[in-house]
């Protein structure tokens, strides 16, 4: 069965950068987009962007342009999300999701606090 | 950017039927927006119930169905169970971007 396993929780200082990972298994990694979605405490789901693992091309939500970078390593079937210049309102659970059917990872809690 | 609109909250009686809807600020919803429906319970990751308007995953209970209705995407729950109480989100895919609805809090009471 399709599985996405995400890296562990992070506690970051404001202004820092964080890089999250998402390891995919049980399907052909390069055949489906990986989306990144976040959810702040008590809030709804917010789409951050997606990457095509086949060629590395990415689309980012406008509000994250300039602060987000999505990459992948096809040799280990892993996608990455890097978010820079962290603020307290970036505190959220970050999910990676396989496109076409939307299979969700378990989520990674990122806490931004001084 | 497009705005996706859902009912903030709905209530259904156990065994009853309820329809949640999802509209787009760009106009009528079509299958070309590849509508999705997700269920999320407190403390859990979202779970995909419906993809591409009406397709179900193996784990999707038969009482859930997806459709297009009156220019919107719709999720119908027939025979509500207490365990269906949750937040439900929809999603549309536009050219180059994806937008979630704000969610519907469904109460089974």
Image (cartoon, grey):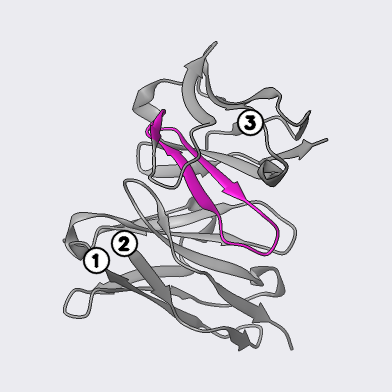
Eyeballing the image, is B11 above or below A61?
above
Q: Is residue A47 magenta?
A: no
Position in image of residue A82 (x %, y %): 44, 75
A10 or A23: nearer the viewer: A23
In the structure shown, which secondary structural element does the residue marked by tag 1 occupy?
loop
Determine whether label 1 and label 2 are within 8 Å by CB. Answer: yes
Quadrant for the C terminus of chain B, please. top right
Position in image of residue B32 (x %, y %): 34, 26
Q: Circle 2: is it few (<14), some (14-19), or many (20+) Cα within 10 Å?
A: few
* Residue marked by disc 2: A2
Tell me which numbered mark, 1 or 2, is placed earlier along the sequence.
Answer: 2
Tell me which chain the residue with mark 3 is part of. B
* Residue marked by disc 1: A26
B19 or A17: nearer the viewer: B19
Q: Quadrant of residue B93?
A: top left
Say which residue appears at 59% left-offset and 52% top-offset. A45
Distance between the alpha carbons at the discs numbered 3 and 1: 34 Å
Instruction: Please report the bounds of the magenta region as a residue range.
Output: B34-55
Q: Which mark is residue B5?
A: 3
Q: Is disc 3 on the same chain as disc 2?
A: no
In the structure shown, which secondary structural element does the residue marked by tag 3 occupy?
strand
- Visible in this render: residue A30? yes
- Visible in this render: residue B28? no
Position in image of residue B87 (x %, y %): 68, 45
Asked if residue A52 lies left or right of residue B27, the reply is: left
**Figure disc tally:** 3
Q: Circle 1: is it few (<14), some (14-19), or many (20+) Cα within 10 Å?
A: few
Say which residue appears at 44% left-offset and 47% top-offset. B59
Q: Is disc 2 on the same chain as disc 1?
A: yes
């Amino acid at each position: 069965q399709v599985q996405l396993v995400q890296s562990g929780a992070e506690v970051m200082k404001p202004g820092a950068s964080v890089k999250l990972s998402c390891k995919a298994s049980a399907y052909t990694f390069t055949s489906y987009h990986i989306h990144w979605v976040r959810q702040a405490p008590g809030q709804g789901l917010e789409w951050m962007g997606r990457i095509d693992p086949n060629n590395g091309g990415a689309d980012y939500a406008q509000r994250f342009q300039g602060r987000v970078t999505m990459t992948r390593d096809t040799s280990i079937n892993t996608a990455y999300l890097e978010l820079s210049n962290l603020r307290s309102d970036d505190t959220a659970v970050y999910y990676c999701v396989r496109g076409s059917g939307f299979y969700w990872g378990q989520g990674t809690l990122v806490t931004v606090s001084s | 950017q497009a705005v996706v609109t859902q009912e903030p909250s709905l209530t259904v009686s156990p065994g009853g039927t309820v329809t949640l809807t999802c509209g787009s600020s760009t106009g009528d919803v079509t299958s070309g927006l590849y509508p999705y429906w997700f269920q999320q319970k407190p403390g859990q990751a979202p779970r995909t119930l419906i993809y591409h308007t009406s397709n179900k995953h193996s784990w999707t209970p038969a009482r859930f169905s997806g459709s297009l209705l009156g220019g919107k995407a719709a999720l119908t729950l027939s025979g509500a169970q207490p365990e269906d109480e949750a937040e439900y989100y929809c999603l549309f895919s536009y050219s180059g971007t994806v937008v979630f609805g704000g969610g519907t809090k469904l109460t089974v009471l």
